[in-house]
Amino acid sequence: MLITGLFHLAIRTADLETTIAFYTRVLGLKEVPRPTAIKFPGAWLAVPTPGGQAVIHVYAGSAATDPDGAIPIDNESGVADHLSLSAHGFLEFREKFKSLGITWREQNNGGSNWQMFVHDPNGLKVELTFEQSAEPGLPAPIPDVNRYKAAERFFSRDEYARAVE
């Protein structure tokens, strides 16, 4: 038996347009066609890598609601804590989040992996993982204000209206 990779992750959203804009314009994923048999609103967002692609399924409308009709907000209201994606361009992502006014956190625990944490517009924490040997400019100092603390909650929905305009 062997797990060979991530096939997809599904995210529920009350704001489909902003969610698509975050994952495509901010993180650089690409929107790919969904099967026409799926009748509820949503999107499929793919990791643009050669040899296959993991896909983030975004559910909107009635498919995104709990039995009481509510749509979860922030990663505190569900069982998923975060989504981790392999990434390249640590310093570029840092500058992009800074220029867009999106709060992020960073960490390196002394190994070769560096992590950057940001929330999507729905409050899902997204971890971007970078391999130090492939990153120009790493190691780099992590400012105290951006240092990751596991229990810290730093999601602010208001940041995303400005970021994806």
Image: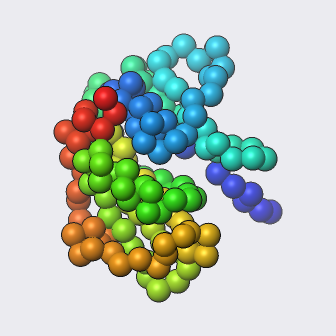
Q: Quadrant of residue 115?
A: bottom left
Identity of the residue drawn at 69% across and 47% down: 49
Q: How is the image coloured?
A: rainbow
Residue 158 percent coordinates (x, y): 19, 39
Residue 110 vs residue 68, the one in the foreground: 110
Residue extending furthest toward the front: 137
On screen, residue 86 above or below 39: below
Q: In which quarter of the image is residue 3?
A: bottom right
Question: Image quadrant for the N terminus?
Answer: bottom right
Residue 71 vs residue 56, the one in the foreground: 56
Determine if residue 157 is in view.
no
Residue 134 percent coordinates (x, y): 61, 70
Determine if residue 106 is in view.
yes
Identity of the residue drawn at 44% across and 63% down: 91
Residue 5 percent coordinates (x, y): 69, 55
On screen, residue 139 above or below 58: below
On screen, residue 107 above or below 121: below
On screen, residue 13 above or below 90: above
- Horizontally, residue 91 falls left or right of residue 15, namely right
Residue 23 percent coordinates (x, y): 46, 39
Residue extending furthest toward the bottom: 110
Question: Image quadrant for the C terminus?
Answer: top left
Identity of the residue drawn at 77% across and 62% down: 2
Identity of the residue drawn at 25% across and 35% down: 162
